[in-house]
Amino acid sequence: MSARQGGIKMSDIRDNLSVATVAKIIGKPEQFIRIGLQQQRLPIGSAVKTSSHWTYHISYELLKNYIGEDRIKAYEKKCAE
């Protein structure tokens, strides 16, 4: 059985994490995450520019490989409290 958050399966959330969530986990500003993805300096996902709008995809697995699963689990535990 999968955990649910607001009617969304956690596995769906983990497929594409938000910039805001990743910024909180890493402890950096959201702009740091955006620019890091745009410049391909953060190995956690990708940024695509369509016209004048940027779209971001952040992979749970790539983030886990970058910072370690312990930090992600600590953030999830903190949010559950």
Image (cartoon, grey):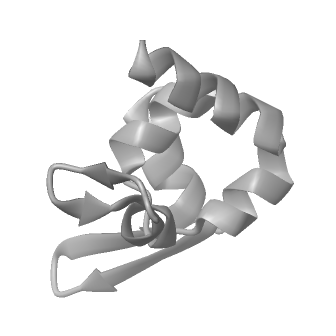
- Residue 32 lies, with reference to residue 24, above or below; the image says below
Q: Position of residue 72 (x, y in %)?
A: 66, 37
Q: Seen in the image, is 19 located left or right of residue 36?
A: left
Residue 43 seen from this side: no
Q: Closest to the observer: 79 or 62?
A: 79
- Residue 67 lies, with reference to residue 2, above or below; the image says above
Residue placed at 51% from the left, 16% from the top?
78
Q: Closest to the observer: 28 or 61?
A: 61
Q: Position of residue 61 (x, y in %)?
A: 71, 66
Residue 49 seen from this side: yes
Q: Seen in the image, is 79 located left or right of residue 61?
A: left
Residue placed at 44% from the left, 52% from the top?
34
Residue placed at 84% from the left, 57% from the top?
65
Q: Seen in the image, is 49 located left or right of residue 69?
A: left
Residue placed at 58% from the left, 68% from the top?
59
Instruction: Identify the image quadrant of residue 48.
Output: bottom left
Q: Seen in the image, is 59 located left or right of residue 21?
A: right
Residue found farthest to the bottom = 50
Q: Quadrant of the C terminus?
A: top left
Instruction: Identify the image quadrant of residue 51.
Output: bottom left
Instruction: Identify the image quadrant of residue 40.
Output: bottom right
Residue found farthest to the top = 81
